[in-house]
Image: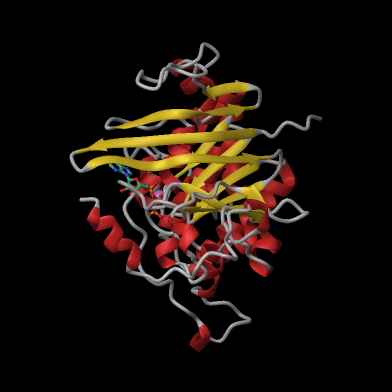
Amino acid sequence: MTDTPLLTVENLQTQFETDAGTVRAVDGVSFTVEHGEIVGLVGESGAGKSVAIRSLLRLINAPGRIVGGEVTFDGQTIIGFEDEPDADSEPVQCDEMLTESEMRSQIRGNEIALIFQDPMESLNPVFTIGEQLCEVIQINRGFSETEAREYAIDTLREVGIPQPKERFDDYPHEFSGGMRQRVLIAMALGCQPKLIVADEPTTALDVTVEGQILDLVYDLQEKYDTSFLWVTHDMGIVAEICDRVNVMYLGEVVERAAVDDLFYDPQHPYTKALLNSIPRPDVAMSDLQPLEGTMPEPINPPAGCRFHDRCSDAREVCTRVHPDLKEVSDDGQCAACLKHDVFDAGYEASPVFTRGAASTEGSARE
Ligand SMILES: Nc1ncnc2c1ncn2[C@@H]1O[C@H](COP(=O)(O)OP(=O)(O)OP(=O)(O)O)[C@@H](O)[C@H]1O
Ligand code: NI
């Protein structure tokens, strides 16, 4: 119907003010989710995945603050700032931005459904599963109580809850973790959302149950054409369900690709290292290479490319020049790495970077 993406995130920046300094958790992140697409957001722990998705739903609390960027969803402005504020002044929110009450009534749990790792974050322990599901359905569909009950039972059956009529009156604690996660998917479906945002929803589940949930997601996406934004650090899940993937490192997206391109021809050394560190059917366990080093804290992130200190391809120029995400192939694959010609940063001529040299320079500043 329209070529505009369902969700557009542009240059999103979220920071936390702490005693140790400003944590630049999300530092200029851009990506889109098209209609009917399953998009992955991957990266190591602390990369900024959760902060990014909480930001786009405006679920950031103090000391956190969204300081810049634009998020539009289905023609509505979720986040927007006035152009060019003075360098010193506070960013000013633009007039088009949805109000908090509009976010609550129209967006969250309605047009965009959320599924978190811990289902108890979204389920109320003192109400039955059926009551909670019916409430969502009645609010979003305008069904009568009887209609809602019937619909709720059908939905529970659809997400694979056995004996849904009997389980309807159970409380959340009477369900297993996997069953609770299915209930959340049922609730998400009850809202008929355009987008489901999921933050590592299967991490706490065993592999068999995880597989069932992923199958379910796939079926639902096919059936209802729902879009998904799926946060995970598990490349296996990415391979299984995603159409496109954004790889995050230290608050930035460093690679974006269709899932096949990402696996067969990663264009950022970080993506390559991530892929080499995970078990795969085509690679012997003994050939796996653990990702060396740890990701630095997002307070005073490293200058230049933030990955340079852990990168086997790093040159001296990588310690100085910060690469933004750029298209590096004809089919739209994007990477933020100076080794690609489009950056024209003198990478080839630059001497190989030796680890340790930069840290001396860093400490000299102190
Ligand atoms: N309330 C907070 N105060 C200070 N720093 C925070 C806060 N919440 C998150 N951060 C920091 O923001 C950065 C990004 O965190 P985030 O939770 O988004 O990572 P993640 O990619 O979701 O990791 P994981 O895979 O472990 O869930 C981290 O350095 C984290 O310490
Ligand atoms: Ni997270």
Horizontal and vertical percent position of residue 46: 37, 53
Horizontal and vertical percent position of residue 89: 36, 18
Which residue occupies the extreme front position in the image?
Answer: 349
**Front residue (pair 119, 97):** 97
Residue 350 seen in render:
yes
Which residue occupies the extreme right position in the image?
Answer: 1
| 294 displayed left or right of 115 | left
| 192 displayed left or right of 18 | right
| 181 displayed left or right of 344 | left
Location of residue 32 by image quarter: top right
Check the image and report above or below for 170 versus 10. below
Q: Residue at x 20, y 43 (%)?
A: 20
Residue 150 seen in render:
no
Horizontal and vertical percent position of residue 152: 57, 37
**Front residue (pair 136, 38):** 38
Which residue occupies the extreme top position in the image?
Answer: 95
Q: Residue at x 51, y 22 (%)?
A: 80
**Front residue (pair 156, 229):** 229
Location of residue 338 by image quarter: bottom right
